[in-house]
Amino acid sequence: MSAPEPEEKKGKDFLRTIIDQDIAAGKNDGRVETRFPPEPNGYLHIGHAKSICLNFGLAHDYNGVCHLRFDDTNPEKEETEYINAIQEDVRWLGFDWKKHLYYASDYYAHFERCARELISAGKAYVCDLSPDQVRQYRGTPTEPGKNSPNRDRTVDENMALFDKMKHGDFPEGTCILRAKIDMAHPNITMRDPALYRIKFADHPRTGSTWCIYPMYDFAHPISDAIERITHSVCTLEFEDHRPLYDWVLAHITIDCRPRQIEFARLNITFMVMSKRKLLRLVQEKHVTGWDDPRLPTICGLRRAGYTPEAIRNFCDRIGVDKTNSTVDIALLEYFIREDLNKRARRVMAVLRPLKLVIDNYPDGQTEEFAAENNPEDPSAGTRSVAFSKTVYIEQDDFREVPPKGYFRLSPGTEVRLKHAYYVTCTQVVKDAAGEIIEVHCTYDPASRGGGTTDNRKIKGTLHWVSAAHAIDAEVRLYDRLMLTANPDDAPAGQDFLANLNPRSREVLPACKIEPSVAGARPGDRYQFLRNGYFSVDPDTKESKIVFNRTVTLKDAWAKIEKNAAKK
Ligand code: ATP
Ligand code: MG
């Protein structure tokens, strides 16, 4: 396995450079305080993990703190289920917000005071234009907008109308509170943006107390300032909003000036990374739930068998920068393989069993062979694997008519059964339909433990499980959920769902596994020899262990690096 080039070991990224400068300039008394501000309207995904690693990482590196703040200003789409799941996922990734758990909804009264302060200063007004009209009046990047007919309302008038908005006297959509900035501003975001809208929706935390809700661009800078955040890190699409962020803080009374800094969001090939699309995949049942192992959600990756370390190492490696790009999914897979290679115990599991009977092996005899648990980690020790007259091998490891270059079992050939003996195929048994149901072999007692005295060359080594000792398992194999590297690359008139891979999940209900995995618990991870890395699924029952394949053994990233080196 070739390791990905360590990003030219690393000059500081641009964020740390900015923070160093701020500290050198004596800003914030040298304090660094960051926040991760999810909107609780879906589950976290690997893109969020980048933001989490970044914000908590900065706090860690500068001896600061990182807050977890729920940006819950959009009552309709938000649910307590998401609030709980988000906390679980951040913790699982290995981060601790200590006592700094906050909710934007706890600041509603503060936001209202700020709104009134702007109204009093003639910096905000209630506007009755319909949403369509607001759009029309806004202008375009090349043309200035037009002033709203309500722009010159008096302070008293605005205050009275805002009171009425707050008291539920107006239906939804009839008016908004807007900042009074400049309808000809070259940055459209600054053309009298909305600050408050009316919504008669129950909020998961404030219930029906409020029917006006602040807009993100108003609530976010104030929340940051209330919490005394020093560096408010967000993704690039908010770059145009930064002047508004600064405008809000400049026009309210608050003695803290957080600095907004933008970085590029993470995209990964073959992965859908927008909450809206993930929600559709879940709601329309294209996947089994938010934690479907095919999803890039944190809980999906966890269920698939990913480790927090692998995700953190991946986030470290991709770093932060200022331009959007897409990361190859093979790089993410590289990091989980690298981690599991070190920690996953090797076992033998047969996914599609074919019975192999050793005719010259004594009936009823069992032998135990020592097998190493992890060649990468001698301290993992060995275990004992039981062998007997009838074993299972993979259907794929037998061909009645072997293709050229096939080194596994076929009539007349000899292969090594890993850790055990050499066997030679003598006979094939078929059912009435002509399907192979059993193969017969003879074994060479002199090859005990997997070698011989004559050192004859054996090319094929097969994994196997003794039929009498095997435990039953269900194994779920996954392929990419999307067929195209860019899931949005859909034929005209269709959306990303057109690119769903119809064969992304395969359930193998009757697998045979060596007994050493008995008692395995959800979350336990193994390498099944030759088959990949697997993790025990929460669907596991006393009677049947269920495994998910986390990733295959094949390292596509090594190939990418090799090809790149050739060029
Ligand atoms: P989506 O576009 O998937 O709905 P969002 O940005 O609306 O995501 P939030 O809950 O607001 O989701 O995100 C919380 C934080 O995570 C924000 O600071 C946001 O910038 C960051 N974030 C979201 N997606 C990514 C991503 N793909 N890469 C890096 N950071 C991200
Ligand atoms: Mg957002």
Image (tube, rainbow, N blue to C red):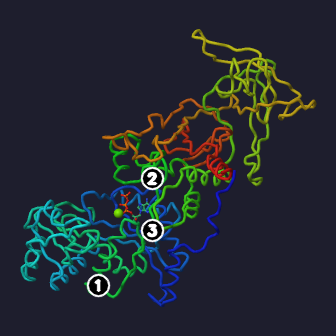
Position of 110 with respect to 395 (left or right) is left
Number of the label disc, if any, that sits on residue 250: 1
Q: Earlier in the sequence, mark 1 or mark 2?
A: 1
Determine whether label 2 and label 3 are within 8 Å by CB. Answer: no
* Picture layout, residue 497 above or below residue 302: above
Badge 2: how crowded within 10 Å, few (<14), some, or many (20+)? many
Instruction: Tell me which image quadrant ligand 2 sits in.
Output: bottom left
Residue under pointer 3? 263
Q: Residues within 10 Å of mark 3 (few under 14, many from 20)?
A: many
Q: Position of residue 469 (x, y in %)?
A: 68, 31
Residue 504, x across and y down, in percent: 48, 37
Q: Does residue 545 sit above or below 561 in this rendering?
A: above
Say the numbered circle drawn on residue 297: 2
Q: Position of residue 480 (x, y in %)?
A: 50, 42
Q: Is residue 58 above or below residue 404?
A: below
Q: Nearer the viewer, mark 1 or mark 2?
A: 1
In this rendering, position of residue 254 left or right of residue 410: left
Q: Is mark 3 within 8 Å of ligand 1?
A: yes
Q: Is residue 15 above or below residue 90?
A: below
Q: Which is more toward the observer, 51 or 350?
A: 51
Q: Secondary structure at mark 3?
A: strand
Q: What SS does tag 2 mark?
A: loop
Closer to the chain start, of discs 1 and 3, is: 1
Task: Name the secondary structure under disc 1.
Answer: helix
